Amino acid sequence: MHSILTALLNTLAGTDAAPPRARRSDLFADSVVTDQFGRRHRFLADLVRDRAVVINTMFTVCRGSCPGTSETLQRLREPLGRTFGSRVSILSLSIDPATDSPDVLRAYAADYGAGEPPRPGQPPWLFLSAGTTDTEALRRSLGFYDLDERVDRDITRHAALLLFGNDRANRWSTSPSQIRDGLIWEPLRRVLGDTPEERFGITHG
């Protein structure tokens, strides 16, 4: 009886803290990645944790969906900057680490306006590479894989998807990248935003 009363009093006093709520990003591999400028990062700890991010997979010699997805992200970067500034990042993960060195990624990034560090208030856009094992761990932990193993092994058939989230709020969603920008923008702002103005365009007063 005494132990039950003690536990109840501790709970009422707030000494028994509730367990922290799990975040979707807890599933992401914290692999070491290198960006197009040669800088090394921990994917989860440095680039995702407590940030708003838009993530896709790509490779520089892709002749399928990658150029179209990169063009979409290039167009979306401006409204993302107007609404969120540098608080949102775009992370493009290469799934061809044997080809996509930082120098190769920087040349590719330059074609889409990301060959130089971002201007103040502009969303960072990082093109990332990692070792083969880390790339596989990241790709799978992010959900960029196909259940059909034959399809999954063929990088030319990778999904044209955007994964986007607000890690602080633990809000995440996905969208096909090959749809009209307007159809992508509204879900993006609702997930990435912190305030009603950012999420819905609602102002007070």
Image (tube, grey):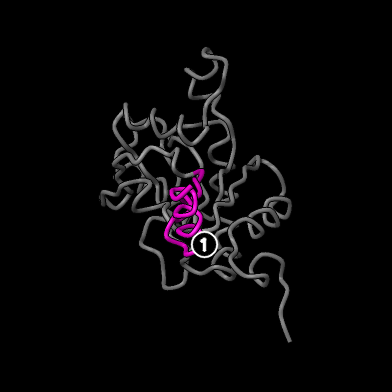
Task: Give the image location of residue 36, x and y in percent.
Answer: 33, 49
Task: Give the image location of residue 6, x and y in percent.
Answer: 44, 54
User: Which of the 4 image quadrants contains residue 124?
Assistant: bottom left
Judged left or right of residue 152, residue 99 is left
The structure residue drawn at horizontal position 65% and vertical position 39%, both measured from the top left corner, is: 176
Q: Nearer the viewer, residue 128 or 196?
A: 196
Instruction: Say if the magenta span includes residue 12.
Output: yes
Judged left or right of residue 102, residue 165 is right
Q: In the picture, which quadrant includes the C terminus?
A: bottom right
User: Which of the 4 image quadrants contains residue 162?
Assistant: top right
Instruction: Say if the magenta span includes residue 62.
Output: no
Q: Nearer the viewer, residue 114 or 29?
A: 29
- Would you name the residue on which mark 1 appears? 12
Q: Residue furthest top?
A: 150
Relative vertical location of residue 167 with respect to residue 203 in this rendering, above or below: above
Q: Nearer the viewer, residue 66 or 147?
A: 147
The structure residue drawn at horizontal position 57% and vertical position 64%, both measured from the top left corner, is: 78
Give the SS element for disc 1: helix
Relative vertical location of residue 161 with respect to residue 124 in this rendering, above or below: above
In the image, the segment drawn in magenta is 1-24
What amino acid type is highlighted by mark number 1? Leu
Q: Residue furthest bottom?
A: 205
